[in-house]
Amino acid sequence: MRINIQILLHILVKAQIGKEKTAIVKDKLSNHERFFQYFTQTELKLLLTKAQFKILKIEQYNESQKRKAGRGEVEWILVLARKI
């Protein structure tokens, strides 16, 4: 008997909108530093294609579009992909 398993991948990352590729930000609640690496849609598509994923959905949006109290200066990239 053959079992067919599908691997799905959901990614939500901060989009690179400036020249900076990384940032270290102090978390206001925990007071710890957090590391961020920013990506472009093109970079994510290339990485996922090389890893043999088929992109089912990719969307870049401003945080204020999805959340009432969202930050207007923050862009996100949402990806849904399936392993080929």
Image (cartoon, rainbow, N blue to C red):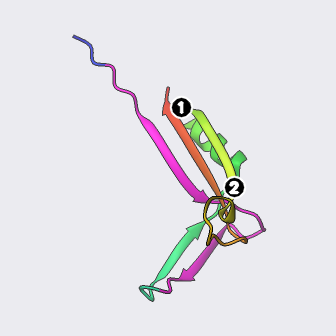
Percent from the top left, x then y, of residue 43?
A: 68, 48
The quarter of the picture where residue 62 lies is bottom right
**26 horizontally vs 75: left or right:** left
Seen at 66% across and 46% down, the residue is: 59
Numbered range of the magenta stretch: 4-28
Residue 37 vs residue 81, the one in the foreground = 81
Q: Is residue 37 above or below residue 30?
A: above
Badge 2 density bin: few <14, some 14–19, many ≥20, Cα 10 Å: some
As drawn, the residue found furthest toward the front would be 68
As drawn, the residue found furthest toward the bottom would be 31
Q: Which residue is mark 2?
A: 61
Q: Nearer the viewer, mark 1 or mark 2?
A: 2
Seen at 53% across and 36% down, the residue is: 81
Task: Identify the disc placed on residue 52.
Answer: 1
Going by the numbered disc 2, the residue's amino acid type is Tyr
The quarter of the picture where residue 58 lies is top right
